[in-house]
Image (tube, rainbow, N blue to C red):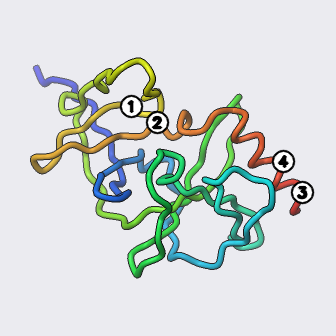
Amino acid sequence: MSENTEITQCLTFNLSDEVFAVDVGRVREILEITSITKVPQTPDFMRGVINLRGSVVPVIDLRLKFGMTETERTVNTCIIVVEVTMDGETNVLGFLADSVQEVIEMEQGHIEAVPHIGTKMNTDFLKGMGKHDGGFVMILDIDKVFSSDELAAVQENNCAID
């Protein structure tokens, strides 16, 4: 009798020296860095918006969102466009990554729960820690990276631009 092992395909990318991953099924596309239009009175981590084939797509700096230094533009910097679901509604947004690595397959047995590091740190946005190539990959729950208030603010700013 064969064991039914659930395998998740993840796109891995770098933020600073850390490796993160997001479910491939949520990724729409990967873009080279392009000009980003800054929107006034938005949170620091919202770098602005881009025009993606006629649609306004907000671009988030995940490094700032996660308390790191701002993402610098390099030859490898890219925008990963993903679908985020909140309150039953699907939103499209992009986030900056220092570089994209590869698509990997993660077996459920290789994904560990996120360790609780004190009480102040919110790790709800992590699905788990995956073991890959002798190190760890932080697997994002892309729907929980942003609060409903943050996504609402992003959506309101999109409506103002449309």
Which residue position is annotated with label 4? 156
Looking at the image, do the residues carrying marks 3 and 1 touch, with CB atoms under 8 Å apart? no
Q: Nearer the viewer, residue 161 or 88?
A: 161
Sooner in the amino-acid sequence: mark 2 or mark 1: 1
- What x and y, as percent, mark residue 83? 59, 48
Picture mark count? 4
Residue 160 numbered tag: 3
Location of the N terminus (image quadrant): top left
Looking at the image, do the residues carrying marks 2 and 1 touch, with CB atoms under 8 Å apart? yes
Q: Which of 26 and 31 is in front in this view?
A: 31
Q: Nearer the viewer, mark 2 or mark 3?
A: 3
| Mark 4 closeness class: few <14, some 14–19, many ≥20 residues within 10 Å | few
Which residue position is annotated with label 2? 141
Q: Which of 97 and 53 is in front in this view?
A: 97
Which residue position is annotated with label 1? 127
Q: Which residue is depicted at the point 52% across and 66% down?
A: 79
Distance between mark 3 and mark 1 Cα atoms: 33 Å
Q: Is mark 3 on a helix, strand or loop?
A: helix
